[in-house]
Image (tube, rainbow, N blue to C red):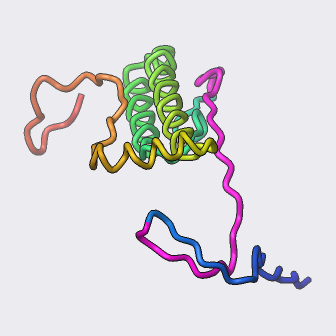
């Protein structure tokens, strides 16, 4: 059975010139689509033997670049919880972090996608004045080992 290939979506075939902050000129579009941002945190990270981490536990805008970091931190915390036999502590440790990340990225997304002309103008004036700023990493203070293990020794 052969599948038919869909022709690419031709959003607007007419050629228009669009300027984006004076840095680029868009002369046309071959294809476009909509991206909808959802902000969600799971009600529970554990239900019996089922455990959630990363994107399964929280979904948010890519604004701020925290998604992969938060997922990696979830995996690390889950591994430590499994090793220590303290799975009940995992959700209490990671869910508040995910809620803060989701709230932060939600605020950033609202600023970036402001519809009000005055809000967009204020944003466009303020951002260049602020200059480049590092995005804060939102995490929980993870316990660190007292001293690194010697090469060849086994972790306990």
74 within the magenta span: no
Q: Residue at x 59, y 39 (%)?
A: 59
**At x 62% / y 41%, what residue is drawn?**
116
Q: Quadrant of the C terminus?
A: top left
Q: For this view, does 47 lie left or right of residue 146?
A: right
Rendering coords of residue 66 (x, y %): 43, 41
Q: Position of residue 127 (x, y in %)?
A: 37, 46
Residue 39 versus residue 141 in the image, above or below: below
What secondary structure do most residues of the magenta stretch adopt? loop
Q: Quadrant of the N terminus?
A: bottom right
Quarter of the rendering containing residue 60 = top right
* Count of picture labels: 0
Find the residue positioned furthest to the right: 1
Q: Which residues are magenta?
A: 22-49
Asked whether 86 or 89 is in front, the reply is 89
State the residue in front, 65 or 110: 110
Where residue 154 sits, quadrant-wise, is: top left
């Amino acid at each position: 059975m052969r599948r038919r290939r869909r022709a690419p979506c031709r959003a607007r075939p007419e050629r228009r010139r669009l300027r984006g902050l004076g840095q680029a000129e868009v002369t046309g579009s071959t294809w476009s689509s909509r991206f909808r941002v959802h902000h969600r945190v799971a009600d529970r990270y554990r239900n019996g033997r089922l455990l959630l981490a990363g994107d399964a536990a929280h979904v948010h805008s890519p604004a701020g670049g925290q998604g992969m970091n938060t997922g990696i931190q979830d995996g690390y915390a889950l591994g430590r919880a499994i090793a220590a036999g303290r799975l009940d502590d995992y959700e209490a440790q990671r869910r508040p972090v995910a809620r803060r990340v989701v709230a932060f990225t939600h605020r950033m997304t609202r600023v970036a996608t402001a519809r009000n002309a005055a809000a967009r103008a204020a944003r466009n004036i303020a951002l260049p004045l602020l200059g480049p700023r590092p995005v804060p990493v939102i995490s929980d203070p993870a316990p660190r080992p007292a001293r690194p293990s010697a090469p060849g020794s086994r972790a306990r």
